[in-house]
């Protein structure tokens, strides 16, 4: 048995069906826009994330990932804050030869630096001389390395504050 639809039910049903169809179409369009946006924005965002992680962890990143960042990055030129006369240096013998640190301290002093102390390094097998610096004194360390023709400059490693005897830089005389 069929019941005839009232006039209001006949008018409501087509609108419901049309609303459901339009909502489904809108959902599909939204999904397509999200996928397109992911492809357009995802690649640059991925490169930026890789570069950020690499900077934090000092990891090696493929050159293609950093190519656009390297073009924009300007080199940081640091100028020493302290003059040679106000820069104290700890000179250590890292090659085991008797008197090597004292001889090197004389050369460092002749260049105008203060000598905080002279002594022996914990090891005597350094193949090359090295200039190490306390945090914030890298420009001074680079200047000292340039003055003495020392190829390696690095942050202080393996020396305590007490061992530095107030020096801002440490020079370990190696075999060369």
Image (cartoon, helix red, strand yellow):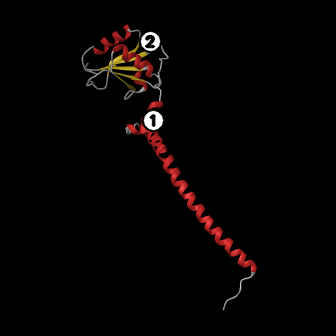
Would residue 166 be visible to someone looking at this image? no
Extreme-bottom residue of the structure: 1
Q: Which mark is residue 128?
A: none
* On screen, residue 113 above or below 135: above
For residue 95, side relative to residue 169 (left or right): left
Q: Residues within 10 Å of mark 2 (few under 14, many from 20)?
A: some
Q: Position of residue 20 (x, y in %)?
A: 63, 69
Give the quadrant of the N terminus: bottom right
Q: Who comes first in sequence, dot 1 or dot 2?
A: 1
Task: State the image quarter where residue 85 is shown.
Answer: top left
**35 w.r.t. 141: above or below:** below
Q: Is residue 126 above or below residue 51?
A: above
Question: CA–CA distance between discs 1 and 2?
Answer: 39 Å
Mark linked to residue 68: 1
Viewer can see residue 6: yes
Is residue 148 rendered to the left or right of residue 127?
Answer: right
Instruction: Locate residue 93, reporting x and y percent.
Output: 30, 19
Residue with the mark numbered 2: 84
Image position, residue 173 (x, y; %): 30, 19
147 vs 50, nearest the viewer? 50
Nearer to me, 51 or 82: 51
Residue 164 occupies which quadrant of the picture?
top left
Residue ID at (26%, 24%): 127
């Amino acid at each position: 048995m069929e019941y005839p639809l009232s006039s209001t039910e006949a008018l409501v049903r087509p609108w419901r069906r049309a609303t459901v169809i339009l909502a489904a179409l809108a959902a599909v369009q939204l999904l397509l826009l999200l996928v397109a946006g992911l492809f357009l924005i995802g690649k640059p965002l991925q490169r930026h994330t890789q570069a950020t992680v690499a900077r934090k962890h000092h990891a090696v990143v493929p050159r293609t990932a950093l190519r656009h960042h390297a073009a924009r990055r300007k080199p940081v030129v640091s100028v020493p804050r302290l003059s040679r006369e106000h820069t104290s240096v700890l000179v250590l013998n890292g090659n085991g030869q008797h008197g090597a640190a004292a001889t090197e301290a004389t050369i460092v002093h002749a260049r105008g630096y203060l000598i905080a102390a002279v002594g022996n390094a914990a090891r005597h097998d350094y193949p090359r001389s090295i200039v190490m610096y306390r945090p914030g004194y890298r420009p001074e360390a680079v200047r000292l390395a340039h003055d003495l023709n020392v190829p390696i400059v690095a942050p202080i490693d393996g020396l305590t504050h007490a061992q530095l005897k107030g020096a801002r830089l440490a020079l370990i005389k190696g075999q060369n």
